[in-house]
Amino acid sequence: MSPTRFLRPPLVWLVLIEAGLLAAIAVIGWHAWQARLAAPQVVVAPAAPRSRAGLPSGLGARRSPSPAPPVALPAVPAAGPTPSVRTDPQFLSQQARELNRAESSFEDLQWRMTSSLVNAIRYYLDHVVLPAVQRSEQSR
């Protein structure tokens, strides 16, 4: 088998297209992963100027007021509880009953299929294979 057989145009184009699609999927996945890991943005509010109205005249002139520390405000409002499965007993017992009902019907279907298959094999053996073996033994 020669390697030039694999370099025919339809196969080459299909391989190149597949490689391009795989690269595009990898880039999209990488960007999605990086967006998920990005740190949340924090907005800093400007500090409000302090008033010197209540200070004695000598104190306000000598000191320069120290700026107030910036207040960090979250860019996104606080999130509520994270999505999860409910854990109250009534909900869990209802889910368990539904799961057991579905599992029971699946097991019943599985048993009916298995017993039908066993009956079909027995019928084939009794009515096709066994008579053919008996005929061949009688003819000897």
Image (spheres, grey):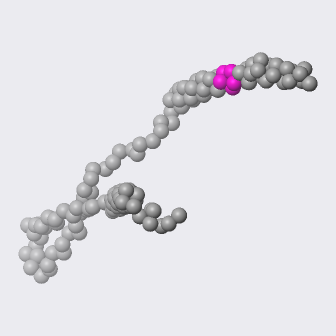
- Say whether residue 93 is left or right of residue 75: right
The magenta stretch spans which residues? 112-117
At which x and y percent is residue 34? 35, 62
Q: Is residue 111 visible?
A: no
State the residue at coordinates (50%, 29%): 91
- Say whether residue 109 is left or right of residue 55: right
Residue 39 lies in the magenta-colored region? no
Q: Is residue 138 above or below residue 99?
A: above
Residue 113 lies in the magenta-colored region? yes
State the residue at coordinates (71%, 21%): 120
Task: Kindly indicate the quadrant of the structure image that contains residue 124.
Answer: top right
* Residue sitting farthest toward the front: 139
At which x and y percent is residue 83? 41, 43
State the residue at coordinates (26%, 62%): 42
Task: Kindly indicate the quadrant of the structure image that contains residue 13.
Answer: bottom left
Q: Quadrant of the C terminus?
A: top right
- Say whether residue 101 is left or right of residue 67: right
Which residue occupies the foreground of this view, 131 or 35?
131
At which x and y percent is residue 43? 22, 61
